[in-house]
Image (spheres, rainbow, N blue to C red):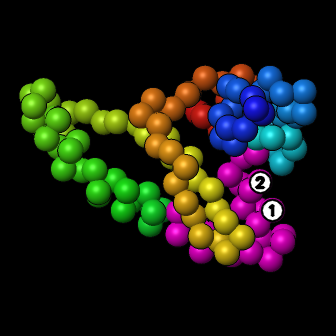
Amino acid sequence: DDAYRHLTNYSINKSSPNFIENQEVQADNYGHKWSISALNKHLRCIGLDDKLIWTSIMDLIVKTLLAVQPSIGAKCVEVSVPHGTCFELFGFDILVDDALKPWILEVNLGPSMTAESPLDWQVKS
């Protein structure tokens, strides 16, 4: 078994001997974690439409949230949460295939906001 098979699990993959950590904010396209702006620049450089890809990803996320909204709304009523007084942060792990179609790998109810590098601080703040 490959212990590093979890494509999007940073806390597991950072222990791999092949993991390359980014330590510089300015070099945000180096290593195994990139900034969104570095990814977008890379996509444009290889001739892909980053705006179209993000539109597809956002469409998938909105449809996912709409699908579970009745359950979330019912739970809020059940625990007597006053309307408009709270929020939930979800972490979406998305894989984009070679046809540029996004796929949800998982939705995290408690995504990590821990910053372990200068790039993490920039991305998560």
Q: Is residue 41 magenta?
A: yes
State the image coordinates of residue 69 (x, y, percent, origin top left). 24, 50
Residue marked by disc 1: 42
Mark 2 neighbour class, 10 Å CA radius: few under 14, some 14 to 19, many 20 or more: some
Badge 1 marks a residue whose secondary structure is helix
Does residue 66 lie above or below 119 as drawn? below
Q: Identity of the amino acid at label 2? A: Ala
State the image coordinates of residue 84 (x, y, percent, origin top left). 19, 39
Does residue 78 lie above or below 56 as drawn? above
Q: Is residue 12 left or right of residue 76?
A: right
Name the image quarter holding the C terminus.
top right
Instruction: Identify the magenta region.
Output: 34-57
Q: Is residue 125 magenta?
A: no
Q: Residue at x 70, y 26 (%)?
A: 12
State the image coordinates of residue 1 (x, y, percent, origin top left). 76, 32
Mark yes or no: residue 47 visible: yes
Residue contact at pointers 1 and 2, CB within 8 angstroms? yes
Residue marked by disc 2: 38
User: How far apart are the alpha carbons under marks 1 and 2?
Assistant: 6 Å
Mark 1 neighbour class, 10 Å CA radius: few under 14, some 14 to 19, many 20 or more: some
Residue 2 sits in quarter: top right
Q: Residue at x 86, y 32 (%)?
A: 19
Q: Residue furthest front?
A: 1
Residue 72 sits in quarter: top left
Q: Identity of the amino acid at label 1? A: His
Does residue 108 lie above or below 53 as drawn? above
- Camera-nearest residue between 59 and 41: 59
Q: Residue at x 37, y 56 (%)?
A: 64
Provide the major secondary structure of the magenta segment. helix
Badge count: 2
Mark yes or no: residue 24 visible: no
Q: Is residue 5 left or right of residue 96?
A: right
